[in-house]
Amino acid sequence: MVGSSDITDREWGISGKNIEDIMEALQVADQLSTDNVLQTLKLLKVKILNNKMATSLCQKVTDTIVDYLRTMKPQGELEELCTGILTALGFQSPGIVIFKLWDRWHNNLPPNCLLIAVGRLIFFQGCPDSEGRARIRNQASWTQSIKFPALRLGCSPPWHTVLKALVISVRKHLDLGTKEDEIMDITQEAASLKAYLTLRLLFNRWSLKSNNKVTEQALVITGHLFFLMPPSKLKNQVNRLTRWLMTLISAKVVPFYISQCICQLTEALALSGYGGINLESQLENIIGMLFEQLSETVKDSDSLSVQNHSLALRSFYNLIQLYNDQVIPLIRKNMQTSDPAKIVSALQVFMHVFQEVPQTEQLQSEVMHSVIIMIQEDLKPVQKALLNFIEMLGQHDYLALPQGNFIINYVIRLSESDCSNEEDIQILCSKILQMVSLPKLITLACQPSNTLAFVLLSKTATKMALRARSRGQVPYLSSFHLSPTQFISPQKLLTHLVVLSVKPYREGEFGVSSLRLLYALHPITSLHPIINSSVGQLWMKKIPQMLQILDDHTEKNLNQEEWEDRLLQFSSQSLVAIDDDSWLEQLIKVVLERINYFSDDEEKAFLYKFFGFTLRTSRNMKLIKMMISSILQTVHEELQEREGIAVALSIVSMKHLKIVLDQLQVYSAVLTDKDSSFILKLMKEHQRREWGLVCNIIYLSYSKIILESKGDIFTHLDGILAMVLQHYHNCIMEKDKNLKLEYLDALTKLTNILSSHPMAFQFKFPQKLEIVTFMMELIREEPLNSISSSIRLKAMNIIIDFRKLHPLMELEERTELLRTCYKSVLCLPSTEVLQKEASSLQEAQATVLLDTWLNSQKDNERERAMWCAARILGFTAKMNNFGMDIEFSRLGRLVRLLALRCQDPVDNICFLSAQAVYSLYCILLLQKQMGRKKQGLWEEEGKNEVYSANVFYNNTFEIAKAFAEYFTKMQLTTLVLTAMEGLTDSRAKVSLAAAQLMSAVMKERGRDMIKIEEVVEGILERLNSQLEPNTKEETVRAMCLLAGNNTHTVVPMLLNKTLPWDRTNLALWKAFGNQRETTISVLQLLIGILERLHSKEETKEMAFQPVAVTCALYEMLSGSLCQEAVQELYPRLLLAILCHLYWVIEQNVPQKMVVYSKEGGPGSKSKPFDPTSCALEVVKLVFSAAAYDGVVVYGDQHCCWDLLSCPRFYYIGIMDLTSNSWLPVFHPSGIVKTCEPAILHRILNLVRSLLYSSSYHWKILARAFYAQLLWHRSVAQTLGQDLLVNLIKWVKEPNLIMKEVGLRGISNLALHPGQAESLKGQVPFLKDLLKNEARVTVQAVKSLRNIICHGKGEDIKVVFCSISKQLCPLINDERDQVKISATSALSHMLRHIDKFKPRLTTRREIYTFLVPLLLSIQDNNTEVVKACGRALTEWTNVIGWSSLTQTFRHITLSDHIQVLEETCKYLVNTSKTQLVGDLLFQSFGFLKSSQSFLRAAAINFIALTVKKLNMSQIHEDDVELLQNAIGNLRNDPVESIQSLVNTTLKKIDEYINFRSISTSRMSQISNNILKVTGIKNPERKKRLFRSVKRERDDDNQKIWRWLQSPLNSLRNRYSGRVKDIPHKSGNSDKQSTGSQVPTSESPPTEAGPAAK
C-alpha cells in the first residue's frame, strides 16, 4: 500500500478496515519515507487521544507499534511519537501496554519507547476504573520489572523510569491503607518481599560504583524500596548499604542522591521504631558521610544543592530519634575538630536536632564544654555559625549556667567597636546579648574590660529597659546593690555613665549611648519612691537637652569645658533631688575608689571634680569630714593627682569652707607631730619625699580655695600663714637642701595665687613680715661661692609675691632686704676658684658665663646668652685655620647645655641653640678631618652634608647621635651625669629634653659608659622624685638602654634592692621587657643566675637573689611586647623558672613573707605574693609571653598549678602540664599540644643533658619533662634506642618517684606505631610492678594498657592473657586509685581485644574478670562504679551478652544493686549450670577477703544468684558446700555481715524446702520403663561444682543413650511442648563434670543466642 502517505485526517475513520491499512503501512515502513511515517504516526496519535477505542482495537494498534519498534528501532522524533502513541493507548487500556513487557525479548531489553510509556502510565495518578487500572498497573508484575535488569550489569535509563515509577506507585497505594487492598492485585507482604528481592538484585547484578546517571537513578529507586521492605530485612542490609554509599562518595556521585538515600534509610528505620544493631554499629560511618555532604557548598541557583543540605539535616533528625545518646557525642566530636567546615556543619546539625534532645545536666555541661573549646580556638570561618548556635542556647537558658559568662564575654569581644567583624555578626551579637538579664548586661557594660563594646552593650541595655518600661516593668536598679558580687550598684552605674559622657564623641557614640541608657533607667533609686518623681522629672528634662547639644555639635566644635560643667551640674542637681545621705555616702565611696584606680588623666581630673560636687551636695558634716580625710589619704605621687585633690577640696569649700580648712589643719599635723605622723613609719628613703608631697597638697589646696573663694577665705589667711611657718620650724624631718626646696616650691604656689588675687590688697596679713624675714634668713644661709641657687631664687620670688600685700615693710626693713639680696647675687666666685674647677681658663670662663645666663629663669637673659654663644661658635667654625687644636675638655657639659636649650620654651632660643650646636659640630668635624689629613688617611666626604641647623632644631636625638663619636668615655659619662640634673627642671619641655639626651647618648655609646653605679643611683633618685610623665617615661627608656649595654652591672644593682620593690623599680623591670635587645640580654643574665644558683648543693637557707629574679621576671613578662625575644629563650627560661619553683617550695619560707605586690584593678586591693606564689605566676607568664596561653588555660582546668606548688606532687604537675596521659589514645594536651615540634625538640635537647644531673631538682624536672615529651611522635622517633634504656634504668631505681616517671615514659612510648610492638618484651618486667606502691602500680597498669591498646596483631591477646592473673586482683584492690585505674584499663583492653575476635583461651581469661567486676560495682565510690560500668559494658560486647550492654553503660551509684540483680538473673536464665557454678565458686574466695566490703559484696552476689536458681534441683553436696562457705562468716567481726549471712542462709533453706506439689505423668512412665529394662534411673539433680566425678557403668551408658531418644519423643508427645523444651544430648553428664573453674581442658560453656 504505497499510497498510504496520502491519508488525511478527513478520510480517517475508526473502522477496522482503515486500521488494518495503517497497520499494513507500518509493517512495510522500511519502504516508506521518513516523512510519510512521521505524518502517519502524528495522525494516529491525534485520533487515539480524541476518541474512545475498543479494547481489541487497542490491542492491535499496540502490537503493531511494538513490532514496528522491534524491527525499525526508530530514533529522534519518530521515537518520541511512538512513545506518545503507546502512552495514549495506555491511558485507555493500560493493561494491554504494560503486558507487552512480558513478551519474549530474547535476552534483550524492551524498546525505550515501551519502557518510557509504561513508566508514564505508572506515574499517572487517578482513580481505578472499571477495568482495574490500578490492578493492571501493579499486575505489570514486579517480577517482570526486575527481570530485565538481571540480564546484564547495566541497563538504559528508561528502565530506571519504569522501576522508579513502580516503587513510588506501590508505596503510595499501600499508604492508602487496608481499605484499598481490594483494588490492588498486590498485598503489602508481597510488595515487601519483591522490594527486598529488587534491592538484592540491584546489589548483586548491577555495578553501581561509578558516577553516572544509572547510579543516581539506582539511588533514587533504592531509597523508595526502603519503605516497602520488611524492617528486619532492611536492618540486615545496613552494613552493606553503608559500604556502598561510602564507595559512591569516593566516586564523587552528586551529593543530593547520597543524602536522599541516607535520609530515606534512616526515616524508614525510624518508622519501624528501632534502628537495629547494624545501624548502631555504623553510626560513626553514616554520620561521617552526612557531615561530608553538609560540607558541600550550597548554591541557591542549584536546587539539588539546597535539597542536599536539607536532606542531610533531616537524616540527623531521624538518627536522633533512634540513637540520641550515641549520636550526640559524635556530633560533639565534629564540633571539637580543627576543621572549620566540620565545625560549622556540626553546629548546623545540633541546631536542627536540638529541640528533640532531652535537656539533661550532663548534656548542658558537655555542650558548654564544646562551645568553650570552639571559642578558645576562635576560628574566623566558624564565628557566624557559632553565634547562631549560641543564640539558640540562649533561648534554652544556657547563658544562665556558670559557664555562660565565658560565652557572654566572647560575644562581647566580637561586638567590640574596633573589631573588623561583619555587620551580620554584630547583629547576632546584639540578639544574643538581649537574652542576658538586664542587670547583668548593665554590669557587663560598665566593666572596664568591655569598654570597646560599650556602645553596643549600652544600646542593647537601653532597648531592653525601654521595652520593659513599655510593659509596665520599670527597670529600677537600686535593689541590685543587695548582691554586689553579681550586679553593679546604682552608684557605680551613675558614676560610670557620667564619666563615659565626659568624652561624648569617643568611639563615635559614647556620650549619647551613656545618656540614653541613663534616661532609660531613671529613676535609679527605686527604694525611695518619694524622690523618684523629682529625679525622674529632672532627667526627663535635662538628658534630652544634653543629647540635643551633642547632636548639634561635633568633636571639633564642642566646648569641652562647658560640657563638663554641664555634666557636673546635672550630677549635682540629681543628687539634690535624691536627698539621701546613705545613698550619697555610697556614691562618694565609689567615686573615691574609681579615682584610686583610674588611669586616664582627663577622666581622672573629672572624677576629682565629680567628687567635689558630690560632697558639696551633702549636709552630713560627719560624712564630709570623713570623705575629705579619705581623699587626702589617696595616692598623690603625680602632680595631676595633687592638683585633682586640691580642685576637689576647693569645690567642697564653696559650701563647707570651715570644715575644709579644719580638715586641712588636722591633716597638716603629719608635718609637725612626730607621735601621730605616718611619714615616720615609711622607709627612711621615702620619708623626705612624702613630707614634701604632703606639704605640696596642703598649699596647693589653699591656693585653689583662694581662687574659688569670693572673699571668705581671707579672714582665715593669717592663721594659714602662721601654720606655714610652723610647718617648717617644727618640721619632723631633718632640714636639708632638698627639704627646703620642696617646702619653698609648695609655698611658691600659694604665694603666687595670693598675690594675684584682687581682694588680697583689702586685707592685712601680720604674718607677712615674719615670712619675709624667714626668707631673708634662707637667702643668707646660702653659700656665696655658688652662682646658681634654687633656694635663693625661690625665696626671692616669695618675697616678690608679698611685696604689695599689707602691712608694708618699713624703710629700714626694705633696706636690709635689698642689701641681703644684692650680696647674695653680686658676690661671684673668685678667679682662683674657677681655675681649680676648669681645665682651661678660656673654656672655664666661657662655661661659667654660659651656665649663668643660659640657665636663667628669665627668657630675655637666656635669649641674649644664646645669641652670644651662637655668634662665638659660628665665628670659630668659619675660621679655616685649624692648625692649632681647640681643646674642648668639657665637651659633654657644653653639648648638654646647648642641647637642652634646643628644647627651650622660647622658640627663638631653640633656633639660636640649633645654630650653635651645628657650629660646634662643624668645628669638631673640621678638627677630625685635619687630624686624618695629618695621618695620611682618606678624607670622609659628604659627612657635613648629613646635618644642618634645621636637623638639630628641637631634635635632641639627632644632637646626641651627631656628637656621640667625639666624646671620650669621661665626657660621655659627664654629659649623662649633668643631663640628670635637668630632669627635675620645672619646665616640662626642658626636663624632657634632658631625658631624651640621656636616652639618645646611651643608645649610641652606652657600652662606653663609666661610673655605671653612680649613673644608676642618680637615675633612680630622679625617678623617685616628682618628674613629668613624659620625662619619666623617657628616663626609664634611658635606663633600659643602659641596662641593655651594661647588663652585668645594672641588673645586679637593681636585684639587690630591698623587696618588695617600689613603683620605680617595678617600672624599670617592666620597661626591660619592652625592647628586644635589652630583653634578651637581661633574660640571659637572669636565667644564668637561676641556673647557677640552683645547680649548687641545696641549702636550707633562703637565698635572696633568685627570689628577686622571679620578681623581676614577673614585671618583665607581665607586659612583654617582645614576644620574639621571649620565644628565643623560651625553653631555657621555662626550665630555669620551673627548677626555681621546685627549689623555693622546699624552703622554709617565713609566714606572710611578701616579696612582690601586684596592684589590683578598680575596686580591689593589691595582691601580695610570697616567693612560691610569685614563682608560680612567673611560670604562667612565661607561657603567656611566649604566646602559649593555651598551656595556662589547660593548667587551670587540670589543677596543674596546685600540683606544682606542692613539693610532694611537683613532678606530677610537670608531667601533667607537659601532657595529660590519663587516656589510652592519642589526645595531645598541655605543652605538647600547644607548642610547635621545634620548641619541643629544643626543650628535649636541654633536658637530655640534665637527666643525670647531680642536682636532685634538675634531675626530677628533666626526667619528668623527658617522660612526657615522649607523648609526641616526633620526639619518640628522634630519641631512638637509648630512650627505653633510660626509662628501664629509672624504673629499677629504688626512688618511687623515679619509678613512676620511668613508667610514665614507657606508657607514653607505647602510644606510637611500632613502639608498642617493641615494648611487648618488657611485659614480664612491668607485670612484676603491679604489686608495688599505689602510684607505681597505677603507672604500670597504664603502661600495660597502652601496650595492648596500641599493639597490632594477634599477639596482643597473648599479652593480655599473660597479665590477666596479676591484673584481676587489682580490680578489688583496697586503694581506690589502683582499683579505678585497673578497671578503666581493663575496659580499654577489652575494647581493643574485641577487634581481633578472641578465641577460647582468651575468652576463658576474660570470664575470670566478671565476678571481681560485679563485686566492685557495689562500691560506694562513684568513680569506681562508673569505671566498673564501662568495663562491664566492654565485657558484654566481647562475650556477647548484648542484652546487658545498655544496662551496664548507664549504671549509677543509686541503681547498681538492681543492675547486679538483673545480671544474676540473666546469668542463671541464659547460662549453663557449669558456668554459674564456676562463678559462684570463684566468689567463695572473696568471702575470706580482709576487706569487709568485698565479703559483703560476695554474699550479695551469691544471694542474688541463688535466688534465681532452682535449689531443689541442685545436688545436696553442692548445696552443702554453698552453705558451709557462707556459714563460715557467721562470726564475722562486722555485725552487718553477720546479719547478711543469717538472712542469706535462711533464704537458701527456704529455696531448698520448696518442692513441686505434683509429679508429671511422664516421670512415672519413665520410671516404669527403667524398672523393666533394669537400668538405674540417672541422677536428675544438677551439679554446680565439678569437684567430684560421677561414674556410670559403660553398658548402662550405652543402653541409656539408646533409650534417651524414645523417652524424649514420648515426653514431647505427652506434653505437646516439643518446640519449647531444649533438647540435650545423652552426653550431658560428661559435660557437667570437670574442674572447679574453667581450664584449657574444659573451657566454660558460653550462653545466650548472642554469644560470639
Image: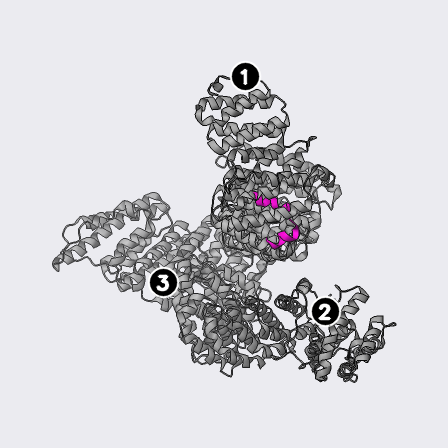
Residue behind mark 1: 9
* Image coordinates for residue 1019, horizontal then vertical, percent: 40, 61
Q: CA distance from mark 3 to mark 2?
A: 95 Å
Examine the structure image and report whether residue 1018 is included in the region drawn in magenta. no
Q: CA distance from mark 2 to mark 1?
A: 82 Å
Q: Quadrant of residue 536?
A: top right
* Image coordinates for residue 1633, horizontal then vertical, percent: 69, 80
Which element type, helix, strand or loop, lies under badge 1? loop
* Image coordinates for residue 341, horizontal then vertical, percent: 50, 49
Of mark 2 and mark 1, the one earlier in the sequence is 1
Of mark 3 and mark 2, the one earlier in the sequence is 3
Residue behind mark 2: 1623
Q: Is residue 510 above or below residue 1327?
A: above
Residue at screen point 68% across, 81% down: 1636
- Of all residues shown, which one is farthest toward the right? 1557
Residue behind mark 3: 1044
Q: Is residue 583 above or below residue 1158?
A: above
